[in-house]
Image: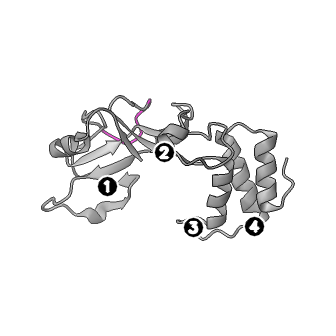
Amino acid sequence: MIYIKNNNNYINEILSRFTLCDIDNWAVFNDNNQLEFEDKPLIDRFIEKIEINSSINTICKVMVRGNLKNYNNRKISNPHVMFLTKKLCDSSGNVKYGFYLKPPVYEYASLNHYHTKSIREYCKKIKKGDVYYNVTLSRNTINNYYFHFFKYNIKTKEKIAIFNKEFNLTIK
């Protein structure tokens, strides 16, 4: 979710000056110790970001202004990597060179990622499958998902119990 502070025309203003805008202020949020889904906006449910200087917050996505003449969009292999042929700016509108700018700046906008959400939502996401890879839910991949979740979230007995029950496991 792109979160824009105080200016609804922010993206249009940036892209009117630049061909490409690198939203380098990637913000990943932890589970805020929530166990279950709650019917509220994500921005209200999850307020604690993972440590700003964490490597996961150095990732960026690129926005490209549409209807560009003589612009070959096939040079965009994915939203994280581009062959730069046009001017690139950061989310503050400053010209930049290269993608990974530390520390992220959250003054104007952020690209919010609610990566794990609550433990119950995370389990549901795992069961649904991965959109990029055809991953079989073997014991090994479930273990990997488990360790990934607790890499970014506080480990509690309640969360472990929910995870184990969802996958019929006894991980400690």
Looking at the image, which residue is at 81% across and 49% down?
Answer: 161
Mark 4: which secondary structure?
loop
Say which of marks 3 and 2 sits in front.
2
Label 2 sits on residue: 41
Of labels 2 and 1, earlier in sequence is 2
Q: Which colour scheme is used?
A: one colour
In space, the residues marked 3 and 4 are separated at their CA atoms by 14 Å
Query: Alpha-carbon distance for marks 3 and 2?
Result: 28 Å
Tell us which disc is closer to us: 2 or 1: 2
- Mark 3 burial class by Cα count in 10 Å: few <14, some 14-19, many 20+: few
Disc 3: which residue: 133
Name which quarter of the figure residue 105 lies in: top left
User: Which residue is at the front of the view, 21 or 86?
Assistant: 21
Q: Which residue is drawn at 68% across and 52% down?
A: 120
Query: Which residues are the magenta region?
Result: 97-103
Give the label, 1 or 4, closer to the camera: 4
Q: Mark 3 or mark 4, which has the lower sequence index?
A: 3
N-terminal label among 2 and 4: 2
Query: Residue 138: which numbered mark, if any?
Result: 4
Q: Are marks 1 and 4 in contact (CB under 8 Å)?
A: no
